[in-house]
Image (cartoon, helix red, strand yellow):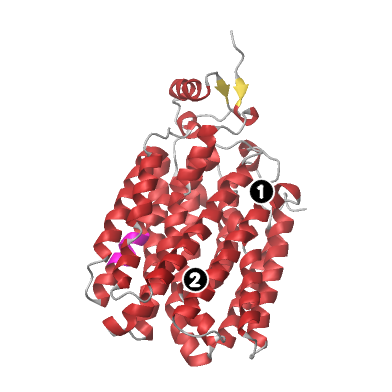
Amino acid sequence: MQQPRNFDDMHFSAIHRRIMLWGSGGPFLDGYVLVMIGVALEQLTPILHLDATWTGMLGAATLVGLFIGTSLFGYISDRVGRRKMFLADIIAIGLISVATMFISSPVELLVMRVLIGIVIGADYPIATSMITEFSSTRQRAFAVGFIAAMWYVGATCANLVGWCLYDIEGGWRWMLGSAFIPCVIILIGRFDLPESPRWLIRKGRIAECQQMMEKIFGEPVIFDEEPAQQTRFLQLFNKRHFPFVLFIAIIWTCQVIPMFAIYTFGPQIVGLLGWDQGKSAALGNVVISLFFMLGCLPAMYWLNSIGRRPLLIGSFAMMTLALTLLGLIPDLTMWLVVVAFAIYAFFSGGPGILQWLYPNELFPTDIRASAVGVIMSLSRIGTIISTWLLPLFIAQYGVSRTMLMGALISLIGLVVSVVLAPETRGLSLMKTANMTILKNKP
């Protein structure tokens, strides 16, 4: 009789690659639709007669939807499973994208942006939990890093598509509806993916899990012992879990507020800092977006070589420095502006991965998706407010002070990381799920 192998000893196989690729479709679409509105607003502002208040509201609308979607559907995913929700939300994203092509007023566009935010937000806790639970300890940082990288791939694709459609009359309709195409591709890729094995075990469905593992790998597979446990949402607020909720929510907020500002209003910011407005500014945003994407690649390997904690601290330090330079030196040439943004973008790769990796490592299977959802929702409170107020803040105080405000937010992330960041490198999910926040800080 063949001896079962531990799941952590399994080689990175075709099923791992498929789950990693198609599971990251939600983050790809998030980056795509969030950035696309920034480019589309260049055409929509005169057509819909948008002022700074409306521009800020439309920029923040998707984040409001993300707040609702992540907090609600993370819990639902822990209750009913990953796979069912994995398919339904992608269908909804595609349909809403097509519907957005036919809006005729700011209110209609606002409603569509909130709705698409809700369904994209639903995908985050589902997809990240699925990928984490299908990854071994050695693969985990790379697999979750791939999720973060795909957000930036989506954002870069949006910038490129927006740039290509910029001079076309009515191009904004095709920009906003174009998300339908990747939705169809992702849906086909996800259609026959299996349920999460760790979720099945946590729900006591061990025989079903073993049958699935033998079908996928052709041999028996065992996991670290994880007793059956029903999802109890209030566990997130107990003495062990709540400090991690706050820590991750703070570093997530401090990473995404400046990043979302750069992405959502990138063409306008780049133009105000010295590059031409319009299509040239959109092209500058493509360059910056590429550096955001490239920053994830070395970080995916540094997480296992130098560790989670040093990477987080060093990244926040460099991000703070880059934004400070943009704020303090008023007359940078356009290329120095792009270089400073590129430094910020490159070093955001580490925190960008860790904001996904930490919650998936530090919480047990029965509340993992709920934790991702709640933490992401908490981080979106700050981003909703900041994205809404950003156009007003720039109009009143100028872009230099805006960059200094971003540097201050990044500095808060640095301080919190120095004080609280744990080290989870090389630990199994069972071990990380039993850590406490201060005792595991070197």
Q: Which residue is mark 2?
A: 263
| Residues at circles 1 and 2 in contact by the CB criterion of under 8 Å | no
**Above/below status of 25 relative to 265:** above
Q: Amino acid at mark 2?
A: Tyr
Give the image location of residue 434, x and y in percent: 63, 41
Q: Nearer the viewer, mark 1 or mark 2?
A: 2
Position of the N terminus by quadrant: top right
* Left or right side of 261 for 305: right
Give the image location of residue 214, x and y in percent: 50, 20
**Is the residue marked by circle 2 packed among few (<14), some (14-19), or many (20+) residues within 10 Å?**
many
Q: Which residue is mark 1?
A: 436
**Above/below status of 100 relative to 53:** above
**Is the residue marked by circle 1 packed among few (<14), some (14-19), or many (20+) residues within 10 Å?**
some
* Left or right side of 321 for 256: left
Sequence order check: which comes first, mark 1 or mark 2? 2
Residue 270: in magenta span: no
Give the image location of residue 12, x and y in percent: 60, 34
**The residue tagged with tag 2: helix, strand or loop?**
helix
**The residue tagged with tag 1: helix, strand or loop?**
loop
Main SS of the magenta segment? Answer: helix
Q: Which portion, as a residue range, is magenta?
A: 112-117
**In front: 332, or 132?**
332
